[in-house]
Image (cartoon, rainbow, N blue to C red):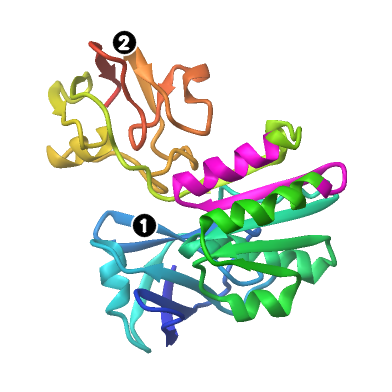
Amino acid sequence: MILQVTAVRTPSPGLRALTLVGDDLPSYPPGAHLPVEWAPGRVNPYSLTGLGIAPETYEITVARRSGGSARLHGLEVGDPVHARSPRSGFPPVETAAHHVLVAGGVGVTPLLGHARWHAFWGHSFEVLAVGAPHLGTLRELGPLTVARDRRELADLLRPVVGNAPWNSHVYTCGPPGLIAAVAAAARAAHWVDARIHAEPFVHEPAGAPFEVLLRRSRRRVRVAADESLLDAVDRIGLPAPRLCRQGVCGECLTTLLAGTAEHHDHVDAAEHGRIAPCVSRAAPGETLELDL
């Protein structure tokens, strides 16, 4: 799709909110991403924050980092944007009796789409946020509790999950520490994992270095301790599919031909003999062989 920037806002320092228009924009579910091409063959996904029913515009909020986000921060009204159709990887559970949305920082963006959806359909929901933008909009949509810091958020969350109706679901987007704290609070209230949902920020690679044999291209690459397998493949100029870089969307899944992997994805790659190069690594002392 070729879109055009029609509005630019700064909801808080370091963030840029863009409104985009185009012809026949596809609808999308809450929690969906808009894959934006910021350089030839390079695509970053950004959460859509609007209501996805027959949309006339697309709205995204971008935190300024390197690469694609820096490119988007330089856009002005009238600039073109190349994008792909929205992709969903973090939808609400439609049968839930109540939805608890927990947002940390720019992690509010997919949950803003959730809140708009629930408000539109009259679903039962509430939002807890810490360090998040778009609080004015969230307050207009439904119940909102704002914490001063993560410790206060944990204190506020415990009675929420403890007193929530049966078959409530919780959704978290933010840094790993916040996601872990929310999951711990829900489990302490005897919530099963099927009712606990999260979308993490981009996975930070960490682990021992290892080697990978790429059978189809007949290449061997060494992955550094602070480098993801996908980044290592990029470094040697080998094209590989990717989208979310969080182990959520499944776009980068690759057949694992040999070796034992440490799987950190959320799409059950191991059960299908595959690996998510964006987040997963070799087990200690292992060399992986991939169909790349």
Q: Nearer the viewer, residue 113 or 177?
A: 177
Going from the N terminus, do you reach mark 2 or mark 1 first? 1
- Identify the amino acid type marked 2: Ala
Within 10 Å of disc 2 (Cα), the crowding (few <14, some 14-19, many 20+) is some
Gap between marks 2 and 1, in whole Å?
A: 30 Å
Q: State the residue in front, 158 or 92.
A: 158
Q: Which type of secondary structure does the marked residue at label 1 adopt?
A: strand
Q: Tell me the quarter of the picture where residue 223 sits.
A: top left
Q: Which span is picked out in magenta? A: 163-187
Place residue 3 in its image quadrant.
Answer: bottom left
- Residue linked to disc 1: 44
In the picture, the quarter occupied by the C terminus is top left
Residue 236 picture location, percent across and down: 12, 37
Residue bearing the label numbered 2: 258
Residue 185 magenta-highlighted:
yes
Residue 30 x/y as whole percent: 64, 59
Q: Residues within 10 Å of mark 1 (few under 14, many from 20)?
A: some
Q: Is residue 228 left or right of residue 248?
A: left
Q: Is residue 122 left or right of residue 195?
A: right
- Look at the picture and state if 199 lies above or below 25: above
| Three-letter code, disc 1 | Asn
